Amino acid sequence: MTKLLFQGHGSFRIISENNTVIYIDPYAGEGYDIPADIIIVTHQHGDHNQVQLVAKKDDCVIIQNYDGLIEGKYQSFALKGIKIEAVPAYNKNHDRNQCVGYIIEVDGIKIYAAGDTSMTTEMPLLKEKNLDFALLPIDGIYNMGPEEATECAKLINAKVSIPIHMKPRTLFDEEMANRFTAPNRLIVKAGEEIDLQEVLKSRS
C-alpha cells in the first residue's frame, strides 16, 4: 500500500510500502507528525517551504528547488529506494530559474508534483514518462486556472490527475475543483488519504 495524504493547498505526504515518508511543499493542513525520510520543496515561496513544520528522522534528506536545478540543468536523485527527477515549472509569477516540479517514483508508481506553474513548453514531453498521477495547481491567480490545467492534464496524460492549490489561504475549494474537468480527474479533499495502488486498480 502506497499512501498519499493531501494536506491541503499545495502540500502532500507520501508513505511507501516500506514506510519511507516523503513530504512535498510543507505548509498547510495536518499530518506533519510522522517523521520524514525526505522533504521536497519546489520553490521558496512561503506557502511551499515550511520545512520546520515536519518531524524529521535523523538522516532526513531535504531537496530544495536549488538542489533540483543547478546552472540550468535539472537534477535527478536516487535515495532510500525513491527516484526523484526535477522538471521545469514556471509562469509570470514563478521564475523558471527558481522553481521546479518533480517526478517522484515510489513503489513503481510515478507521481508528478507540478509545483507552481502554468502550461510549459516542456509538458508534452511528460507524456513519454508514462506517469501514474499528476498533481496540478488550478488557482488561476498565481498559477494556471482550472481550464488551462485541464488542457495540461490532457497533454501530460497521466492515468490520474488531481487538482491542488485551488485558492489562496484555502486548503480546498470544491467549486474550483469541479471546474477542473480532465477526463482522468480525481478530486481529493484536504485531509483525505488515498491508496495509490487501489486508485490505479479502479481506473484500469
Image: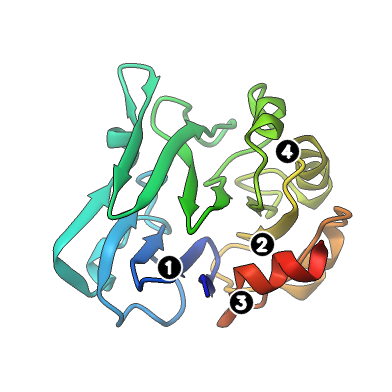
Instruction: Identify the mark at residue 16; answer none if there is no mark.
Output: 1
Q: Label 1 amino acid?
A: Ser
Q: Residue at x 22, y 67 (%)?
A: 52
**Label 2, residues with CA under 10 Å away: few <14, some 14-19, many ≥20:** many
SS for tag 4? helix
Above-or-below relation of 86 to 63: above
SS for tag 3? strand
Q: Mark 3 sits on what residue?
A: 194
Spot occupied by residue 128 in the image (x, y as percentages of width and height)? 68, 30
Q: Nearer the viewer, mark 3 or mark 1?
A: 1
* C-alpha span from label 1 to label 2: 26 Å
* C-alpha span from label 4 to label 3: 21 Å
Q: Mark 4 sits on what residue?
A: 156
Q: Nearer the viewer, mark 4 or mark 1?
A: 1
* C-alpha span from label 4 to label 2: 19 Å
Q: Label 4 amino acid?
A: Ile
